[in-house]
Image (cartoon, grey):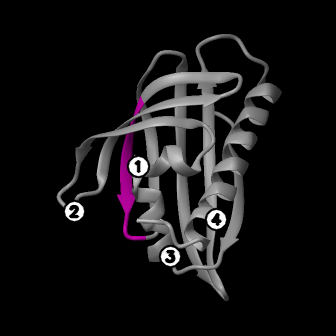
Amino acid sequence: MAEHTSSSITIEAAPADVMGVIADFARYPDWTGEVKEAEVLATDDRGRAEQVRLVLDAGAIKDDHTLAYTWTGDDEVSWTLVKSQMLRALDGSYHLAPVAGGTEVTYRLTVDVKIPMLGMIKRKAEKVIIDRALAGLKKRVEAGTGA
């Protein structure tokens, strides 16, 4: 099993508000530093994204890829890589838990690239992606500019 990186942050908002921003893929380029384009390719019967094409520029990792999303209730979404130009794996999840004063968001990510790369460089890239995404999510949700 591949190693993963995870981190958590508390956002001063209800879980539904946080998930609303997470589920609004069209606005990812507005608040994530790495996602330059996002296009929902398929949705489920509740209108939630099932497949999304993303153009990513995370420094060492640049890619145009498609992810498949699985929604578990209203407090968790996970994804797996469907196709990619340079990635072998891009699997992750957001898990939301209500806490005093808001929502704890845990982001877990595993990245594997097709080109040789040291494990510590991959972990650093994962950490940068996670930290920027969580900071951007917090800022977006708390500013009230979400979905």
Q: Amino acid at mark 1?
A: Phe
According to the image, label 1 marks what residue?
25
Residue 1 visible from this viewpoint: no
View extreme (right): residue: 120
Residue at screen point 54% across, 30% down: 56
Q: Amino acid at mark 4?
A: Lys
Q: Main secondary structure of the magenta part?
A: strand
Is 73 part of what is drawn in magenta?
yes
| Separation of residues labelled 3 and 2 (CA atoms) | 18 Å
Q: Which type of secondary structure does the marked residue at label 1 adopt?
A: helix
Instruction: Tell me: residue 28, above or below residue 144.
Output: above
First in sequence: mark 3 vs mark 2:
3
Nearest-to-viewer mark from 3 and 4: 4
Residue at screen point 59% across, 47% down: 32
Q: Tell me the magenta residue range.
A: 66-74
According to the image, label 3 marks what residue?
15
First in sequence: mark 4 vs mark 1:
1
